[in-house]
Amino acid sequence: MNGPQRMDRPQVYAPSPARAEGAVVRTAEGAVVRTAEGGAVRTAGGAPAHRPIHAPARPAGIPSADIPLAGRAIGAIGAIGAIGAIGALARRAGRMCRTLLPSACALCGRVQAEVVCAACVAEHFAPEPRCPLCALRSPQGRRCLPCRADPPPIDAALTLGDYAPPLDALVLALKRGVALPHARWFAEALADRLADPHAGTPPARPAASYRPWPDLLIPIPLARERLATRGFNQAWEIARPLGRRLGIPSDATVLARRGDAAMQHLLNLNDRLANVQGAFVVTRRAAIEGRHIGIVDDVMTTGATLREAAYVLKAHGAVRITVLCALRTP
Ligand SMILES: [Zn+2]
Ligand SMILES: [Zn+2]
């Protein structure tokens, strides 16, 4: 009649004809309880126990039949502890899943653990000689003609590859919000590239240095309406893990789009006067004055936006600008 017994669970919770009103039943832990109508469990002292089927075991040596209040209190504490333990377990399991479980490479579909598999990284993300100021491909990594003719207020620019098929799919999926892990992957790849600009390939010229690293990372802000519809700023989603990985602070409130009312109130009078034109405003000059700023964006298209942001930041006292963009329109 008895099924397999679990020593951590009382045996008397399901309503049963055999457990009529007043029936005395012994739990697995040896506590004596009395069932009431509908199968509700009452302790020997008559107080309702209300313990659910999956209630945690009572600590040994404290029979609830003898001290029902203490027993119930300890049961409640145990339940809270169990919820906390389950949460911690779920978090740990989530971390393990991210580390251990395979997923499909976003470019070739091969099953592996990273967003982009090693073969695709080697094929599509090999460092190319690029203009050090605008990140366009350039023979021997020399400054391109436009940058020589009209140098941007950017001191160094780093990208992972061209914004073209198949890599553009990574950014498009990120922007659609269906692939936020891509932002973290871009951040990791940018950090690796920043640390070793020619990793894995023979350098086309003496390795460009991106040191010293920026003091502060700032994402290109989204227009307020776009932020509202998209729900996140993909540049910030890249900047935040990139900063954590490099040990550099990141701040999404220093640079704002002009006309963003939510940011305007952060400006003091001097900053209002300094922000008289252009697409961006600096909300806190003190945060950037005398500092090397890394501007982070998902895609550098014409470079005009990043140029404008760099200009505004330098106008407010930034001493050096490094652009870190995931991909570059060729
Ligand atoms: Zn792949
Ligand atoms: Zn250039």
Image (cartoon, helix red, strand yellow):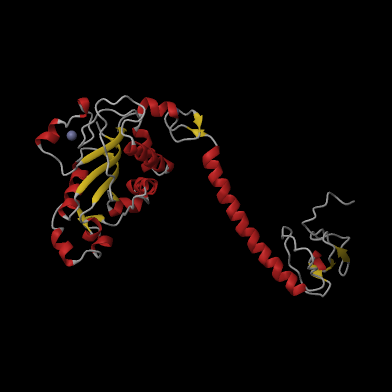
Q: Is residue 130 above or below residue 14?
A: above
Ligand 2 quadrant assignment: top left
**What percent of the width, then of the height, locates residue 26?**
86, 63
**What percent of the width, then of the height, locates residue 181?**
43, 42
Q: How many marks?
A: 0
Quarter holding residue 305: top left
Q: Is residue 171 above or below residue 30?
A: above
Q: Is residue 261 left or right of residue 49?
A: left
Quarter holding residue 78: bottom right
Q: Is residue 186 left or right of residue 268?
A: right
Quarter holding residue 34: bottom right
Q: Is residue 250 left or right of residue 315?
A: right
**What percent of the width, then of the height, locates residue 187?**
37, 42
**What percent of the width, then of the height, locates residue 213?**
29, 45
Q: Is residue 308 left or right of residue 96?
A: left
Please report the residue visible at 27 percent of the width from the left and 44 percent of the height from the top.
212
Quarter in which the C terminus is drawn: top left
Does the rendering let one see residue 279?
Answer: no
- Give the farthest residue toward the left: 149
Does the rendering let one see residue 8?
Answer: yes
Please report the residue visible at 73 percent of the width from the left and 73 percent of the height from the top.
70
